[in-house]
Structures are given as structure tokens and as C-alpha cells.
Image (tube, rainbow, N blue to C red):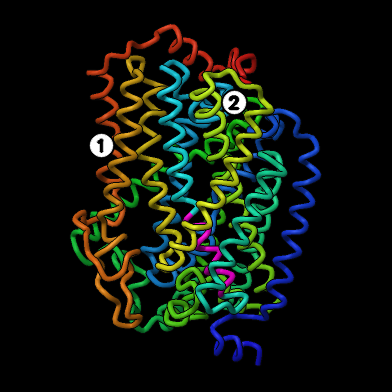
Amino acid sequence: MIRDVAQESGGVGEPLINGGIFLIFVVITLVIVFRVSRSSRSAADYYAAGRSFTGPQNGVAISGDYLSAASFLGITGAIALNGYDGFLYSIGFLVAWLVALLLVAELLRNTGEFTMGDVLSFRMRRRPVRAAAAVSTLAVSFFYLLAQMAGAGGLVALLLDVDSFAGQAITVAVVGVLMILYVLIGGMRGTTWVQIIKGFLLISGAALMSIWMLGSYGFNLSELLGQAVANSPDNGEAILAPGLQYGETTVDKINFISLALALVLGTAGLPHILMRFYTVPTGREARKSVVWAIWLIGIFYLFSLVLGYGAAALVGPERIAAAPGGPNSAAPLLAFELGGVVLLGFISAVAFATILAVVAGLTITASASFAHDVYANVIKHGEMDPDGEVRVARITALVIGALAIVGGIFALSAGLNIAFLVALAFAVAASANLPAILFSLFWKRFNTSGVLWSMYGGLISCVVLIAFSPVISGKPVDPATGTSPSLVQGVDFSWFPLDNPGLVSIPLSFILGIVGTLIGRHPRDEKRFAEMEVRSLTGAGSEKAVPH
């Protein structure tokens, strides 16, 4: 009876039970954040948790930070609706960690700094480079926050049976307020513990559902896939083969290449992931962090394959597409089909924890970048006491939270898959940040002009191409819903054919970095490069150089 009522109303489960579990999780995590915040006394505590976490602890926290709502809700829905092509998101997100492990993790930690701006400005003119790094960090964080906030609104709309857009907007606002509380009270230490708890719960919940799902079919994956095919009449066996989403036209195939490039290269340029490497005491622990993260994230993405096809088999693509939140509702609907209101309540809390942990990490990264790079080092010329810097960071967190709430409400109105929205953030990160980071670490001739050309050029080109892509306007109206998948309805000002701009903006950023270096007037500092090279490769001297 409960299931019938839920389906008729558009929600799923019992709203009071779902809301109660949400409330329990929020209270528990706020208590933990408040307790650990008592040991935060300095800027190093606020920004980098006092560099007190071990490699395994940080690895779990990284997995909690990285496995966002896009991974749990978006990818499950993408696989349920598009099969094999939806799973390609998982492959891209996982392979990206090899780039992070081999090229940036240990080297960034060994510089002994707080933010990406610290690394990029180490041997450059500090003020313009720090400003560029802060602008890029804020842009990437904002794109990522849009996805998480939209996911929060869709999830709670489904679970609390909130049909009105106003109700969903209130949900987004509540998530934003909680996010700000985590950051203001706990700093990086409190945020890290929330991410550790969330990472454990998310992987445990995915494992429970996957085992339950496979057990329903005698642990026979072939039977599960066969039922998914039978329950997807519009696509049939096409959900088991590549090409359903990215194989119909040449533009679709090129779009997939662009998406894959953004996913694989984006992780190593995400500021909130890079900042996690500074919370461990040594470069060796940073390397351990990534190894742990790769194992945990890899296992989770195997579970996502079972969950996605399980949702297609038990729930069905039509019901998923029609539910509040669209494809992002696949995982909660599957939980309800498997275990009723109890399992749904647990999985809902996990998904809510996922969103809160990620948005808290993004907020502290963006606020730290503005306070440390822009206010303290650009505006105040480095002459600012640590307590004042942390105070500015907390004020910035309030502003970022408010902007994230407004942007999340706007993104929610379009009903886009949040895995896709996150892919856009990856494209911005790979375009604006990664080339400058790699050139700074490995190219002796790289100079300030190269940094500015690469970062601003990559960021501007990526954002402009997104603005004039079919994602924003111009996609045809879906006859079933009467709306266009584009963000802006009823107009068409798109001229760039690809949904994800990575194929153009990422190589362009590398090229601009080279051109800017060769024609720039800013001389390189060979002594500082030598110092940075020794420090990044060995860690020698990095502990003594930790900034205020």
C-alpha cells in the first residue's frame, strides 16, 4: 500500500521517516564538527586540518569528497537510462585518478603550501598569479556547487514528496545553510571528518544495495542484465552496447571524446581535491592517500554498474525519467524497490550526506582561495595576521553559500543530470588549472605570462563555449515533457556544437601557456625553480616553508 501511494503522489517512501533520518544525520555530524573544531586554533588548522591526517584517513576523505552526488545519483541514473554509455562516466572519473597519482599528488604536497595559488605563484610574480588562481578556483567551485545543489533539491523533492518548485528551492536553501555551518564551525578538520563518515557510509550503502540486487537474481549478472533489457522496451539490447547516447551521429562521437578528455584530465585540476593533499604530514602520506582513494573509488564504480542496471531492471527507465529529479532519482527508487522505507531512508541519508560533504569541501576551498590568495596576498600584500585571514575566509564562505543557493535553484529548474553538470566543472578545471600546474612543476622556462595566458585563456574559452553550446540553449523540445533539455528555454543562441568543450578548451590552454611563455616579458626565476623542483621531488625544506 505504501508503494502504491508513493507512486501516485510522485514521491517515494514515507516523508516523515526520510526526513527523520536526514535530521539524525545532520545532528550527529554537526556534533562531530563542533567537537573537532575545538582543536582548530590556527590558519593551518582551518585550511589544512593541521596536516594531522594519515594517508588512509585522507584517502577515505578524498573518496568521500570525490564521490559526489554525480557519482551516486547521476551515474546510476545515466546507466539506467543509457546503459553502457552511462557507465563511461565511471570509467572517466576513475582513470582520472591515475593522472592525479602520477603527476600531481605528491609534488603538490611537498611544496608545503595551502592552496593552488601558493604552488603556481612559488616562482612567479605572486599577485597576478594568485589572483588568476583564485578566479579559477571560484569558477570551478561554482560549477561543481551547481550540480550538488541541484542534486539536493531533486533528491529531497523525491523523498519528502515536494512537488512544487518553491518547495524544492527551499530544500536547496536548507542544504546551503547546513554547508555554511559545517565550514564556519569546523574548518578543514571538521569538513574532513564529515567526508570520512560520508565516504564510509556511501561505499557501504552501495555495497549493500549491490549485493542485495545481485542476490535477487541468484548472483547471476547475466540474468540481471537480461531483465534490464526486458524492462527497457524503447532501447532493448542497445543498453548493453556502446553508442546509445554517444554513437548516433559524428557530433555525438566527438562529444564523447570531448567528455572523456575532460573527465580524465579534470580531477588533477580540481581545487577542492588538490587541497586535500595538504592535510597530510608528508608526500609519502599524500601518495598513500591517492592509492587508497583509487581502490575505494574503483570498487564503488563497480557497484554503480550493478546499481544502474538494477534500477533499469526493477524500476524501469520510464518511471525513473518521470520521477521528481528525473535520472537522479534512480538510486533512491531502486532502494525503495529492494528494501522499502527502511533501506530507502538509509540510502537517502547517505545521498544527503554525500551532497553536504562535497559542498562543504568546495566551500572551504573557494573561501580559502579568496582569503589566502586574494585578500591576504594581493590586497594586503601579505601583511595580514592569520586570525584576520581566517575571519575573511569565513565571511567569504557566507557569500559563496548564498551564491550557491541561487545558482542551485536556477540549475534545478532545468532538470539536468548532475553527472553531466559535474563533467562541465571538470572541463573548466582541466582547461584553467591543469596546464598551469604541470608547466609550473615540470617546465623550467615557464613564467608569469605563461601562467596568466594559460589560466585566463583556458577559463574564458571554456566558459564561453559552454555559454554558446546546446547545454544552454537550442536543443529540440522533448515531445514527452514539452520542454527542452537546454538550460534556457524557448531561445537558441548556440553556435558551438559540443555539449562539453574539453576537446577545444584543454589543448587551447596548453597552447596559450606555451605562447604566453615564449612572448612574455616576465623573466623566469631559475633559483626558485630549482628550489621548487628539489622540494616537490624530495619534500626537503617544505615543512619550514609553510606560510602563515
Q: Quadrant of residue 548?
A: top right
Q: Main secondary structure of the magenta part?
A: helix
Please check the rendered image and state whether residue 310 is part of the magenta-colored stretch, yes or no.
Answer: no
**Rendered position, 430 above or below 7:** above
Left or right side of 61 for 121: left
Q: Position of residue 262 (x, y in %)?
A: 36, 46
Name the mark on residue 283.
Answer: 2
Q: Position of residue 242 (x, y in %)?
A: 32, 64
Q: Amino acid at mark 1?
A: Leu
Say which quadrant the N terminus sits in. Answer: bottom right
Vertical order, 125 against 144 (above or below): above
Residues drawn in magenta: 146-157
Total label count? 2
Which of the labelled discs sits on residue 508, or is there none?
1
Which percent across, then down, holds residue 511? 25, 30
Question: The residue under label 2 is which amino acid type?
Answer: Gly
User: Mark 2 or mark 1, which has the lower sequence index?
Assistant: 2
Q: Secondary structure at mark 1?
A: helix
What residue is drawn where x is 68% and y is 81%? 14
Which of discs 2 and 1 lies nearer the camera? The answer is: 1
Query: Can residue 469 be seen at all in this image of the molecule?
Result: yes
